[in-house]
Structures are given as C-alpha cells and as structure tokens.
Amino acid sequence: MHAFARFLCFFGPFALANAVALDAWHAHGLKGSLGADAYVSFGRALDQHYILGLALLATGCAMRYQARRGHVIAGALFTFGLFAFCGDVYLGALGHANLGIAPKGGMAHILGWLFFAGTELFRARPPKAPS
C-alpha cells in the first residue's frame, strides 16, 4: 500500500476521533463559557472537521485501489484544510488571535474535493476480462 494512503487511513479516523472529543467539549464544556458568536463559530469548525476527517479516510481508501497523483494532492489539501480552516476558527472562537489562514484552508478544502473528483473521473479502468 502507498505510504501516504496508509497515513490517510490512519489520520482520517484519528481526526474524526478528535472531532468527537471536541464536539463533546463544545456541547458540555464550552456552552456557558463562550459568547453566542464564538460558540456558533466553534460549531462550524466542528462541522468541517467531521467532513475533512471523512474526506481523508475516503481518499486513503481510494488510494488503496489505485494511487494517483490527484489522490495525493487531494489528501494534502484536505490535511492542510483541516489544520488551517478548523484550527484557525477554533483559535478565534476560544479568544486567541486568528492567524488569518481560515480562508486558505477553506479554499484547500474545496480544491481537495475537486482534485478527488477529477482523479476518480479519469481513473484508469481495469481491462475487461475476455469472454
């Protein structure tokens, strides 16, 4: 198996486990300590965190069958999007200075899906078995 596929098949579920833990903290620990806007922002980052975790897992699984350059690019973009978008929004919601990279993380997320879709669209099909 491609080493990056192995990484994505590990990191996707790891990211999802972290999203569940952060979601529990959001629901039970942060509800009374954050302002309404910050609470909503943290929740929005959680939504994207879940989606990106699933995207990482899906990309890793797709690479197990036929690793393509587009998969590697999509996986890298999803990983960057997770840290840049979610991380920056989490920091801002918790009252820390934003790094200003959330828009770049969001764009990486979008581009990751486009690379993934394009790679799957143009994936080489196995030859048909002779009849």
Image: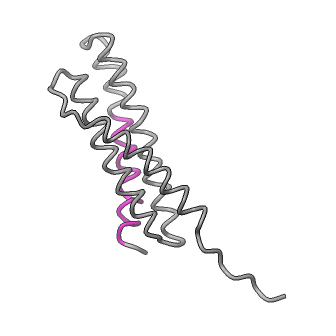
Residue 14 colored magenta?
Answer: yes
Locate residue 47 relative to residue 131 in the image: left or right. Answer: left
Q: Is residue 122 magenta?
A: no
Q: Residue at x 36, y 67 (%)?
A: 4
Vertical relation: 122 (above or below) 49: below
Looking at the picture, how far across and down is residue 2, in whole percent?
Answer: 40, 73
SS majority, magenta: helix
Q: Which segment is the magenta one?
A: 3-21
Q: Residue at 19% x, 29% y: name it.
A: 98
Quadrant in the rendering for residue 74: bottom left
Q: Is residue 100 left or right of residue 77?
A: left
As displayed, is residue 1 above or below residue 85? Answer: below
Looking at the picture, how far across and down is residue 20, in whole percent?
39, 36
Residue 127, image x and y in percent? 69, 82
* 84 relative to 32, above or below: below
Q: Could you tell me residue 87's position as x and y percent?
A: 26, 37
Image point 49% across, 69% down: which residue? 64
Please give left or right for residue 120 compared with residue 104 in the image.
Answer: right
Name the residue furthest bottom: 130
Q: Is residue 1 left or right of residue 87?
A: right
